[in-house]
Image (cartoon, rainbow, N blue to C red):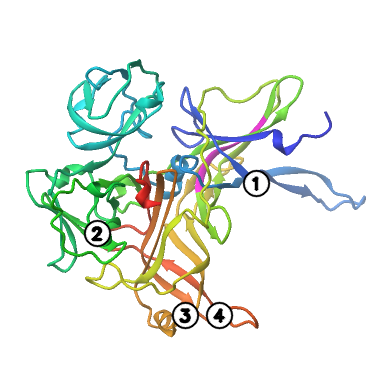
Amino acid sequence: MTTIDSNSTGLAFAEEETLGVLPATPVWYPLEPNGYDDFGGETKLLARNPINPSRQRKKGVITDLDAKGGFGQDLTQNNTLRLLQGFFFANLREKTTNIAMGGTTVAIASVVASTKTIAIASTGASYLASDLILASGFTDTANNGLKSVASSTGTTVVINETATDETSTATAKIQKVGYVFGSGVATIVVSGTYPRLVRGSGSKDFTTFGLRVGEWVFIGGDSAGLKFANANNNGFARIRAIAATYIEFDKTTATMTADSGTGKTVQMFYGNILMNENDPDNIVRRSYNLERTLGEDGDGTKCEYLVGAVANELAIQVKQADKLLVNCNFVAADHEQYAGSVGVKSGTRATLEATDAFNTSSDFTRIKMHKVIAGNTCPDPLYAYLTDLTINVKNGVAPLKAVGVLGAFDMSAGTFEVSGQVTAYFADIASVQSVRNNDDVTLDLAIVKNNAGYVIDIPLLALGDGRVKVEQDKPITIPLKTDAAECDAGYTLLLNEFPYLPSLAQ
């Protein structure tokens, strides 16, 4: 074979135990690259050029190796989240589940139809009555989907919905995705500075949901009885404060109004959050082996690896009439290559569930930039429509070099920086003045597809540029630069992953 088709290549990653060292049995997770950026190792060659009568150089020597690599891929519900932990230098904060991204799997043994019972090895008592759980990976598809918990013990979870008998497989998963309040329990109170979801009756402790300040929830289900009568009280909302009897919001889809919730069993949905952490104990630097296969030869699969790869730069790109794209770049300690006779490294090979990419035309249910105004959860947007948006994350990762080391022996990390570029349609001079005034601004976007989705939130940023662009026969636009900063809650960027959302959110 004299050439290798690019379509015969593949990309996967495994998390290392320490820089450059894989665990005994690594798990390799596949990725879906659209293309690559400088993937590999670049050696530094220094020629010998002694003074000599022949006026010729001598053979040079390899003195250094710079290893790095990047790739871009479409964002889907499940193809990037695990890897994003590396860019945030943090662990995903997951709600209760038996198959956690960062934890020990708890096996589900069976489903008993007559009692509507899911038999679980342990932790069953963590699923409380009225919790909403998403079941997936069961052999019988009737056992998958949104369920509500009736009761539980340490080894059982009883649901309200009809179940089908089955002895489950290792892929069976249940995860908390929300809660359904009893009739009239959830009320909306707007008498204070910020609107609140208040416990109108009963004794449910709202702090047991596992929610935190800065996290987003979605209020309301699909049928009339599962949501508030006033549409303004349903939708995405960001948490400002939590107590046993209320949840207070500082960003809402619309301006909330008082509502007693009479006769309503309102559903509230939540998910998993990933954010840069301000507590040093919660800052986690991950390193990876990035594996790129390079087709087959007569002996097996040829491949190359970026070893000790640390996540450096991330770009989330939103362009009109396009897919939502993520570009990931890594700095690595070393680069390895293997012929087919050696093959790929050992370990467990995970499969990637095929899901659709998010598009920028119909999957965005919210994209809003507005001034931060105390007491106002739904200010007017600075710009009605955006033509493109890029969010950049930089970790300032740099290789550490030393005598006796080809490549790097460690990595240093700099400041967690979040910036970006926005182009918006100009509509109001106030939007230009907001740049000049150095107003506190916030930006968030929500994407929903197939009853799941994400919210990406930058709670505090400053705007730059803002020079109005006027071209003949074209609408006036305004290009902006964004520079994010740590907010009062202690983070700069937050990503909220919702494993389940009602159709109301789409």
Quarter occupied by residue 151 = top left
Magenta-colored segment: predominant secondary structure: strand
The x and y percentages for residue 482 are 45, 69
Residue shown at the point (31%, 72%) measured from the top left? 379
Within 10 angstroms of label 1, few (less than 14), some, or many (20 or more) residues? few
Which residue is denoted by mark 1 in the rendering?
35
Within 10 angstroms of label 2, few (less than 14), some, or many (20 or more) residues? many
Q: CA distance from mark 1 to mark 2?
A: 43 Å
Which residue is denoted by mark 2 in the rendering?
233
Bounds of the magenta span?
A: 303-311
Q: Is residue 302 above or below residue 242?
A: above
**Which secondary structure lies at badge 1?**
strand
* Foreground of the two, 16 or 399: 16
| Numbered-mark total | 4
Give the number of the mark in front: 1 or 3. Answer: 3
Q: CA distance from mark 3 to mark 4?
A: 8 Å
The reply to whether discs 2 and 4 touch (Cβ–Cβ < 8 Å) is no
Residue shown at the point (63%, 34%) measured from the top left? 10
